[in-house]
């Protein structure tokens, strides 16, 4: 249980585009810098402009994603994921990444 599945969205910069997802298997103790770099590379985002959030299956759909912008927030996400994996009997646990730059744009259009 040293790894967690991270679900990363693709094509989030394309307005109206079809969003697909790819899964990365990352160590629970990965550094924030390495995590951020890998997710940015996978999503083809500029690290200087990227902003991420996350959700687990236990979060409500309409609630905004939890902020994921520093090592403390990543440690909290990984700790919560590890707790969920300990309790899971058959469910595969995913740390679902959200592109907050894209989400903020879409939310501003809905208001």
Image: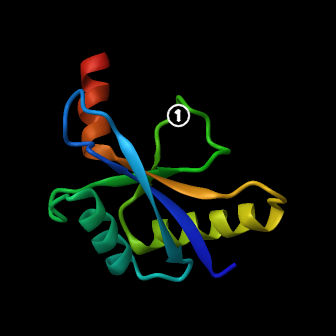
Identified at 80% across, 59% down, the residue is 88
Please state which of residues 59 and 40 is positioned toward the viewer in this rendering.
40
Residue 98 in the image, given as x and y percentages of width and height = 39, 48
Extreme-top residue of the structure: 111
Residue 74 in the image, given as x and y percentages of width and height = 47, 68
Q: Is residue 111 visible?
A: no
- Secondary structure at badge 1 equals loop
Q: With respect to residue 107, does 68 lie above or below?
A: below
Colour mapping: rainbow
Residue underneath mark 1: 63
Residue 103 in the image, given as x and y percentages of width and height = 32, 37
Identified at 31% across, 17% down, the residue is 110
Q: Quadrant of the N terminus?
A: bottom right
Q: Quadrant of the C terminus?
A: top left
Q: With respect to residue 49, does 60 lie above or below?
A: above
Please state which of residues 23 and 40 is positioned toward the viewer in this rendering.
23
Query: Looking at the rendering, which quadrant does residue 41 occupy?
Result: bottom left
Query: Looking at the rendering, which quadrant does residue 79 occupy?
Result: bottom right
12 relative position to 77: left or right: left
Identified at 62% across, 42% down, the residue is 59
């Amino acid at each position: 249980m040293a790894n967690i599945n991270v679900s990363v969205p693709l094509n989030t910069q394309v307005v109206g585009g079809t969003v697909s997802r790819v899964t990365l298997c990352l160590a629970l103790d990965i550094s924030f810098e390495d995590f951020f770099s890998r997710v940015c590379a996978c999503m083809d985002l500029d690290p200087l402009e990227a902003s991420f959030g996350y959700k687990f299956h236990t979060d409500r759909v309409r609630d905004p994603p939890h902020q994921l912008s520093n090592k403390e927030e990543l440690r909290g996400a990984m700790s919560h994921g590890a707790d969920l994996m300990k309790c899971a009997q058959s469910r595969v646990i995913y740390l679902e990444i959200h592109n907050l730059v894209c989400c903020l744009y879409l939310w501003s259009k809905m208001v």
